[in-house]
Image (spheres, coloured by chain):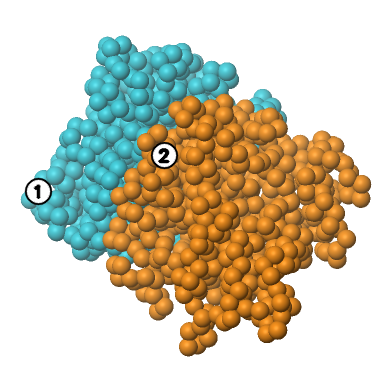
Chain colours: A cyan, B orange
Amino acid sequence: MHHNLGRILSSRARVSGSLEALVEVERGRRFSYAELNARSNRAAHLLREQGVRAGDRVALLMGNGVEYLESYFGTAKLGAVTVPLNWRLVPDELEFILRDSGASTLIFDAEFAATAEALSGRDLPVRRWLCVGDDRPGFASDYAALLEAAPELEPKLGAADEDLLFLMYTSGTTGRPKGVVHTHDSMLWSSLTVLTTAEIRRRDRYLQMLPLFHIGALTPSIATLHIGGTLVMLRRFDPDAVFEVIEREQVTTGLAVPAMLQFMWASGRRASADLSTLRSLLSGAAPVPVSLIRQYAEIGVEIQQVYGLTESGGPACLVGSEDALRKAGSTGPAFMHTEVRVVDEGGSDVGPGEVGEVIIRGRHVMKEYWNRPEATAETLRGGWLHSGDLATVDADGHVYIRDRAKDMIISGGENVYPAEVEDALASHPAVLEVAVIGMPSAKWGESAAAVVVRLPGQELEAAELLAYAREKLAAFKLPRVVEFVDALPRNPTGKILKRELRERFPGPAPE
Amino acid sequence: MHHNLGRILSSRARVSGSLEALVEVERGRRFSYAELNARSNRAAHLLREQGVRAGDRVALLMGNGVEYLESYFGTAKLGAVTVPLNWRLVPDELEFILRDSGASTLIFDAEFAATAEALSGRDLPVRRWLCVGDDRPGFASDYAALLEAAPELEPKLGAADEDLLFLMYTSGTTGRPKGVVHTHDSMLWSSLTVLTTAEIRRRDRYLQMLPLFHIGALTPSIATLHIGGTLVMLRRFDPDAVFEVIEREQVTTGLAVPAMLQFMWASGRRASADLSTLRSLLSGAAPVPVSLIRQYAEIGVEIQQVYGLTESGGPACLVGSEDALRKAGSTGPAFMHTEVRVVDEGGSDVGPGEVGEVIIRGRHVMKEYWNRPEATAETLRGGWLHSGDLATVDADGHVYIRDRAKDMIISGGENVYPAEVEDALASHPAVLEVAVIGMPSAKWGESAAAVVVRLPGQELEAAELLAYAREKLAAFKLPRVVEFVDALPRNPTGKILKRELRERFPGPAPE
């Protein structure tokens, strides 16, 4: 039997069709597995009628909701390839991804119609523009009516196994985002790896409040549907309102990045909220402070911290509260069905306490970077995904991350790649060179700070540089601090010494 | 990454090493995941030191316990092939399986030493005889000491994916048992199929009281270890004692064949027992009476009925209590990751209400019958497992079994194949021909009944025939009723009309 990821939903509709699959919190709509599957089938037929074929790329510029899930599963069943877009990106950034992926279809929420309109005037491969939730002049006609008109029967499955399922863009050392290629099989295994390691149960009510364009939102959402739980889904995170949602929807588990956990803990609503149904929360993207783990443990909520990458489909290591308190700094042992090693430059396992690179193997690891054979060859070597992250490992197989790859900054759960920000700032005509570093932030965990060297004789102030950058970078990537210096510190081979810059500009960043 | 089934246990030991993996109820021993994995590693090294190599067959004549599990996982890691033996079989039956499988190693419990001694005098491929729990003269020295002496580190994995994992013998129309070949991949998927469909959770306490040589015991046991539950394991089923076990061990789920459910319900201990931890019980092998499903539902225990075959690794269809009560006779829709169809002789899906053959597809289906290319070709056609069972299917995909394949009789959860019993009885010199049918039994669900035609001029009584059969057949296969007739009813092409015999001898059978 060949695995198309859409089978998860078809089978679930057959096995537990009347169970609730999705609650859209803000809109108040509810969908059973039978309904969600029927809508996904309609979406597949709709896309086919619009001319989408197996292998075509379908970009999604959408908030969390049923249309996102049905587009994802419908595209999967059809055999086409989803390209989830971060709606925080500016048009220049989106243009790059639409061109690079060769997306011929863009489905967007009416909420993002202004962005779609800005894009529609550019020379892009997009031929089909579908607006959800509104009938926009100049775009294809009403999505809701098209969906309603499409047949509900299961479509012929157009892809399976090693065929492409989605491209998720992530930056890195290069500054240019790369499309991480996941297949039907790698996503299936991401889900199974999560289900056999983290505790997501049938009939769980999973609080899904991260945007679905993140792997940390997508993978556990698929896993929740896979096992027959209910996604209690928010479009926007609100630390006060979330407690009312947990109570009313009897939420049992979910995911919150550390900044969300902090905001929630600080909320005035927490003390009076009934959290008796809440058993655990996954977290990730950055370490959760030990004090916060302990606080949540005291109210009976386990924090399960995940270390992983878009390239690993999400899973790599997981640590529960008990181990995290016992072994400060551990991100846990490898997930089930995952192998994680920490190796030296020769590829041999490091000894206890020695720092090496984290490498990951498992059926959930990406197939390749889209159209980037060199980057693929550099990252997937000998069957192992090379994370670039530096870590130590203890005798129990617990991994301790010492330095995130590529000086990556994690700000409010979003990855900010310094190279990408540096490229954008360095393109200003008055800039000679620039280094971007992370600076501690009480609110966001970290924020970007730019250390800039002006061209001789040029004048440039922080406000002007930031106004320029705002056209090129999503808001979460913008530096909160700009420092001008005469020269950047370098080692003898010319490499910029970012550690030295971090010592010179220790922060914290303003909010 | 390649999947050796032993990785399930190694990974679990890394992720949840201190959790309880196994409780041996009668012996009172308890083993954590770290301990069970370490013992399995030792078993692998022990077998290697004894000369066992990848691909060799290792037969197990053992009761439920840690040594069974460590032998199974140790053999898996080594890359050798387990042959689970039904200890209810007589030496002639075991001899056939040992020869057919070419087993070069037999591991047996001291409890079955008399059987092993009876076998040791025969011309068999077995070269290594390992006795567990006792130091038997004539057999290899003390298993416990050998295990203790073997190293605990992870062995080099000797097999993966499509390589053979175990041969489980089952009879059928031929009368000669056939070895059903399961691979590392098919067993992995049997486990994942169960985990994503039935509700077995991390930290569940699973009551395991069927002998592990049954697929219905083996697969959910592997699944329980896969997800991080605890196996609460009995060597012998006792309907009174089981309630004390459920209370003391806080059992949450498990499996009981319908006869066990009946015995338990009838037990005087039930009314006073605290069953508050018990959430659900899997059942299978035969339909559970609706009245019994309702009775268990009233005390808060869901019955999840499974339809499946050794050839499907266990899973095919599953129905919970609610659906079973709503749709009388349904065995449910297909499991997740499984496709089930009901087809006519041309291979097309039958219409509503029409009877056809059940066919099954999924990664959990067997690879082949061992050294039986013709039987394999007949059973695995076009990628589908042909069950031989006749059924109808409704609009919701629920399957209703109408006639078990090959007139199979299910007695106390054991499959009895009439052809095998007929062969044994017909070999008596005074018998001309014989037909074996099922007869209802209050205690066992069904029992075998033999309808016998004597050779002209020969005298033969039931007692003599049964004494003869006892040498050739396990006790559970022996007819409870022997009827002598002058001729068997046949259709025009000469096929025996068993339906007519069932009408003439409606039973019930004595106990």
Mark 1 element type? loop
User: Which chain does the numbered disc 2 sit on?
Assistant: B
Quadrant hosting residue A465: top left
Q: Nearer the viewer, residue B509 or A296?
A: B509
* Left or right relative to B505: residue B58: right
x 23%, y 43%: residue: A31
- Where does the image place residue A30, in percent across and percent down from the top left? 22, 39
- Please tell me whether mark 1 or mark 2 is closer to you in this view: 2
Q: Nearer the viewer, residue A481 or B178?
A: B178
x 52%, y 48%: residue: B259
Amino acid at pointer 2: Tyr
Distance CA(mark 1)–CA(mark 2): 57 Å
Task: Evaluate whether label 1 is on the same chain as label 2.
Answer: no
- Residue located beneath label 2 in the image: B296
Residue A338 in sight: no
- Where does the image place residue B18, in percent across and percent down from the top left? 62, 27
Quarter of the image that includes the C terminus of chain A: top left
Q: Nearer the viewer, residue B75 or B127?
A: B127
Residue A284 in sight: yes
Mark 2 element type? helix
Any mark on residue A136, and which?
1
x 88%, y 49%: residue: B139
